[in-house]
Image (cartoon, rainbow, N blue to C red):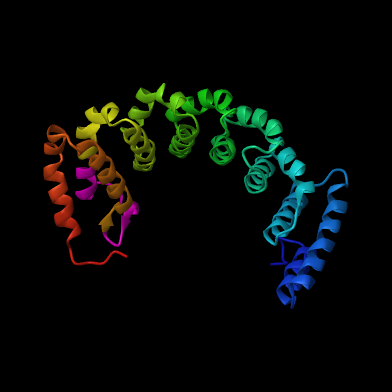
Amino acid sequence: MSGGHLSKEFFELVKSIGESRSKQEEDKIIVGEIQILKAHLSQPNITAKKMKEYMIRAVYCEMLGHDAGFAYIHAVKLTHEKSLFAKRIGYLTCNLFLHKDHELMLLLINTMQRDLQSANHLEVCAALTSVCRLVNSEMIPAISPLVFKLLSHPQEVVRKKAVVAVNRFFKLEPSIVLDHKDQIRKVLCDPDPSVMGASLHILFEITKANTQSCKDLVPSFVSILKQITEHRLPRDFDYHRMPAPWLQVKLLSILGLLGTADQKASEQMYEILQECMRRADSGVNVG
């Protein structure tokens, strides 16, 4: 632990916490560590490697119930760095330190907007992760146009994270998402199964809010469920030889909503539902 990645100072901190015999002794150690961190962070020209460790140590202090608010602004500043290494650490620590209504979010939103338009998909992913964690209702109008644009990004990992962000938007401001409903429905046909799977969550929420809006998607949901049961998805999605069980559960939940009190829609599902039950009754406990 002390070799190469983290300093001897941090190693000694973790060791002393592990060896402390009371909460009072632990608190005394952390109070001392906070004073050391404040001194370190007040120094100019801190390297990215050192700042990474200081942020980890600040997170560690907070995990043990102490306030490390003095480090928050440094986490936000890290997101402004050009170095991808520093930027990703900054976003990660902001996700841990801040909440959606924190006053420092005003300093973070401009960086998010810039990184969502970056040519580097890793920067885009880092920003999207923070959008999912920290976005609030006031931020959505400024952020959402950039996120909806990313639903057609060439990198599948970006498209997937963008879908997750849209799901977050829907829970905060459903009307903004419903204005882009057609764009979201197209994601259901994404060539990457992980992106398609992510879209099921937002489509489930939309269906739950208004079943009529997704009635015409019943054939698409049935077709996807059939492909899954026939093992046409990559093996990575299997769990104990069961094909994509979590996607099956989500699809069955959606079909359950769409088939309620609708015989025409239900009749389109009977065959695949029977097949799902037959294949699930294999006598193998996947848990």
Task: State the image coordinates of residue 237 (x, y, percent, origin top left).
Answer: 33, 52
Front one among 267 and 55: 267
Instruction: Decide whether residue 228 is among the magenta residues.
Output: yes
Note whether 229 is above or below 146 in the view shown: below
Q: Magenta residues, as a range?
A: 223-241
- The residue depicted at 58 percent of the width and 24 percent of the height is 142
At 31% from the left and 34% from the top, the residue drawn is 207
Quadrant of the drawing holding the C terminus: bottom left
Report whether 148 appears left or right of 104. left
The percent position of residue 190, horizontal first and vertical second, equals: 34, 34
Q: Quadrant of the N terminus?
A: bottom right
Residue at screen point 63% across, 46% down: 92
Residue at the front extreme?
Answer: 261
Q: Return the residue nearer the eye: 283 or 243.
A: 283
| Above/below status of 143 relative to 17 | above
Residue 150: x, y in percent?
Answer: 48, 29
Residue at the spot x=27%, y=48% of the render? 248
- The percent position of residue 102, horizontal first and vertical second, equals 68, 38
